[in-house]
Image: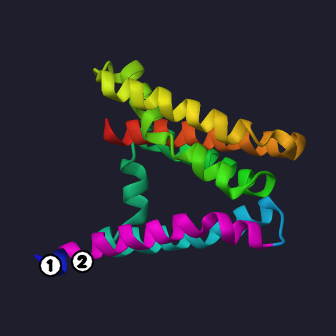
């Protein structure tokens, strides 16, 4: 049982480390956002394809079995990733992190609208408080100019995309 659980746990751990380092690493690279996205896409695509090939033995069969929802989630995730990387190039890493911290609340809102899930009063209050907090923290440092505002908007787009993707995957 420990051996079976070790791979998913390790994958989640490595994913969390990679996700948390994305901001500082993206800021530290002098290349523009499109170059970063190209290399990120090539490397992550190769790793995902290798994993699928190892796991199932047939990449093409898996691609044919994907339904419209999987392709839609892939497209939304791709747009969110482009917005994610570009936002780091245009605004502070802290802004992106704080804005992305509201993703669970946006996901709850999407699930309420799309799946008609009931939302508790506690979630509504926490969501409202989180959004007000983000507005205060991000809005209070508007001295970054138009590029910073564009970066913040891209971080919001990324967060909304990830929230929609979370609900799609859960559904």
How busy is the neighbourhood of tag 2: few (under 14 within 10 Å), some, or many (20 plus)?
few
Q: Check the image and report above or below for 152 versus 127.
A: below
Which quadrant is the N terminus positioned in?
Answer: bottom left
Whether residue 151 appears in this view of the structure is: yes
Residue 11 in the image, given as x and y percentages of width and height: 37, 71
Say whether residue 15 is magenta: yes
Residue that label 1 marks: 2
For the image, the number of numbered tags is 2
Q: Main secondary structure of the magenta part?
A: helix
From the viewer's perspective, tell me whether residue 147 is left or right of residue 118.
right
**Which residue range is magenta in the image?**
5-29
Specify the quadrant of the image occupied by residue 10.
bottom left
Quadrant in the picture for the C terminus: top left
Which residue is most to the left?
1
| Rendering quarter of residue 99 | top right
Residue closer to the observer: 16 or 43: 16
Answer with left or right where residue 39 lies relative to residue 56: right
Kindly indicate whether the residue at mark 1 contacts the one at mark 2 (C-beta within 8 angstroms): yes
Q: Quadrant of residue 2?
A: bottom left
- What x and y, as percent, mark residue 57? 33, 71
Residue bearing the label numbered 2 = 6
SS state under label 1: helix
What kind of element bears circle 2?
Answer: helix
The way the protein has been coloured in the rendering is rainbow
Left or right of 62 in this view: 22: right
Q: Is residue 75 visible?
A: no
Q: Is 157 or 21 nearer to us in this picture?
A: 21
Question: Vertically, is 30 above or below 140?
Answer: below
**Spot occupied by residue 32 in the image (x, y as percentages of width and height):** 83, 63
Disc 2 to disc 1, C-alpha distance: 6 Å
């Amino acid at each position: 049982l420990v051996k079976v659980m070790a791979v998913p746990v390790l994958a989640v751990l490595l994913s969390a480390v990679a996700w948390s380092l994305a901001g500082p690493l993206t800021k530290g690279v002098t290349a523009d956002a499109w170059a970063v996205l190209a290399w990120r896409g090539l490397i992550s695509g190769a790793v995902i394809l290798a994993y699928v090939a190892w796991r199932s033995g047939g990449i093409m069969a898996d691609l044919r079995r994907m339904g419209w929802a999987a392709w839609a989630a892939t497209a939304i995730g791709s747009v969110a990733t482009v917005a994610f990387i570009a936002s780091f190039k245009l605004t502070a890493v802290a802004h992106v992190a704080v804005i992305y911290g509201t993703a669970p609340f946006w996901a709850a809102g999407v699930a309420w609208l799309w799946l008609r899930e009931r939302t508790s009063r506690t979630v509504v209050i926490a969501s409202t408080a989180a959004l007000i907090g983000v507005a205060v923290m991000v809005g209070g440092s508007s001295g970054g100019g138009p590029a910073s505002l564009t970066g913040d908007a891209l971080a919001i787009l990324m967060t909304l995309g990830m929230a929609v993707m979370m609900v799609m995957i859960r559904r």
